[in-house]
Image: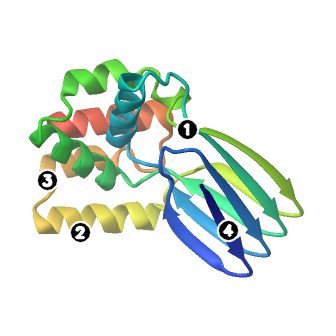
Amino acid sequence: MFHICIMGGYEGVIEPEPKFYFTLFAGADFKRPTIARQILARRQRQAEGRAKPPKQFFLTVCGGVEIKSPTLSEEILDLHQLIKSGELTMSDWDRAISDIGRGAISISSFTLMGGVDQTGLPEESEEIEALALQRHLGNISDSAGQVLQYGIGQRDSERFATGRRAAVA
């Protein structure tokens, strides 16, 4: 499958499937799937007998591509939803989190007169707004919200640990 963006802009979620992205004189912002969704995708791949993660290639010419992590609010809401539905347990999370960074999606890129950022985090204001909204709606408890505040701006293991603490709060 392929995705083409020419002289425009695009914003979307990266799905764990083989894909080719071509960006020409344009900008594209992508969000990685939540950790819970990555765990489910890996489980499905293993059930189908495919051990390797799907390969995705980004060809960027005179443009920019940014791949960001989801907000902490999105992470915790997705985790709660999948736990409630029975598709995931906290023990699944604990087992998978140790190697989640190296297996969700295999990304490679070629960039000519442009830029690609694969390690972006949501802006602090975006994290705060999403957290405030979900707390206001009652989807995230005050105690979990306080824990998530400490994860804003953190990367990888600190971010995962914050999500874990908030999930049990």
Q: Which residue is mark 4?
A: 4
Q: Please identify, in this view, whether the residue under mark 4 or under mark 2 is nearer the observer.
A: 4
Query: How many residues crowd mark 2 within 10 Å: few (<14), some (14–19), many (20+)?
Result: some
Q: Could you tell whether 17 is left or right of 4 in the image?
A: left
Q: Please identify, in this view, whether the residue under mark 1 or under mark 4 is nearer the observer.
A: 4
Q: Residue at x 48, y 44 (%)?
A: 16
Q: Which residue is mark 3?
A: 142
Q: Which residue is mark 1?
A: 105
Q: Residue at x 43, y 33 (%)?
A: 158
Look at label 2 and name its amino acid: Leu
Query: How many residues crowd mark 3 within 10 Å: few (<14), some (14–19), many (20+)?
Result: some
Q: Give me the C-alpha separation between circle 1 and circle 2.
A: 30 Å
Question: Label 2 near label 4: C-beta < 8 Å?
Answer: no
Q: Which residue is mark 2?
A: 133
Q: Residue at x 79, y 75 (%)?
A: 25
Q: Earlier in the sequence, mark 4 or mark 2?
A: 4
Q: Earlier in the sequence, mark 1 or mark 4?
A: 4
Q: Give me the C-alpha separation between circle 3 and circle 4.
A: 42 Å
Q: Give me the C-alpha separation between circle 2 and circle 3.
A: 12 Å
Quarter of the image with the N terminus in it? bottom right
Indicate the secondary structure of the residue bearing disc 1. loop
